[in-house]
Image: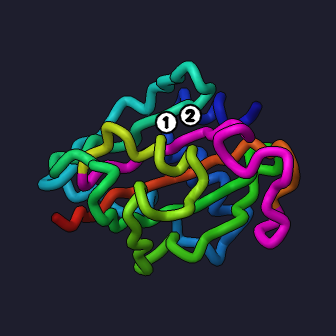
Amino acid sequence: MKWIILLCSGAMLIVQALAQEHDSVIHFFSLPLDTSIAAPAPAMEQRDSSGLIIIDVAYGKGELSAPNRRHYVRFILSRASMEEYVYTEYAGTKVFAFIPDSTNVFPGFKYALKGMRVGGRRRAIIPPELAYGTRGRHSYGIGPNETLILDLELLKLDP
């Protein structure tokens, strides 16, 4: 798969390749990293037993994510099969606020936050079983059994 090969060369290459296809989306990975709150990461894959793959782009220096606290994130959701964005509402300055334990986001989204610190940026490759499964999410153009790519930036946590 093209996107995995590109990640070995650095996460910015995949962002640049997707940006060429979707000029209207400003991907937050391409924005300058505030080194007072984050440090660049080596962009190495970490796979867990569920099939979820995490690739840290920047390690946050702030508080550790906790499932019972309100999270403020920017994110972009893409289909791995087509290398195209399916949800970009929170790609720019708009922020998604939610409490993982009390919100109906798909499980892979919640799992992608585990171990993340405020200021961090990460890519999660989410298998269908942790995303929308066999039913898909047709309103977003996600078919049954789609693997998703979730790019995240954890901006803040409420107490």
Quadrant position of residue 126: top right
Q: Position of residue 34 (x, y in %)?
A: 22, 58
Q: 35 left or right of 11? A: left
Q: Position of residue 141 (x, y in %)?
A: 83, 65
* 2 and 1 marks in contact (CB < 8 Å): yes
Secondary structure state at the residue bearing disc 2: helix
Q: Residues within 10 Å of mark 2 (few under 14, many from 20)?
A: some
Secondary structure state at the residue bearing disc 1: loop
Q: Which mark is residue 155?
A: none
Quadrant position of residue 5: top right
In space, the residues marked 2 and 1 are separated at their CA atoms by: 5 Å
Residues in magenta? 118-141
On whether residue 134 falls in the magenta region, the answer is yes
On whether residue 71 falls in the magenta region, the answer is no
At 57% from the left edge and 44% from the top edge, which residue is drawn? 108
Q: Amino acid at mark 1?
A: Gly
Please identify the residue farthest to the top as the structure is shown: 49
At 44% from the left edge and 72% from the top edge, which residue is drawn? 96
Q: Which mark is residue 7?
A: 2
* Residue receiving disc 1: 10
Q: Amino acid at mark 2?
A: Leu
Q: Residues within 10 Å of mark 1 (few under 14, many from 20)?
A: some
Relative to 57, does residue 98 appear above or below in the rendering? below
Relative to 72, does residue 77 appear above or below in the rendering? above
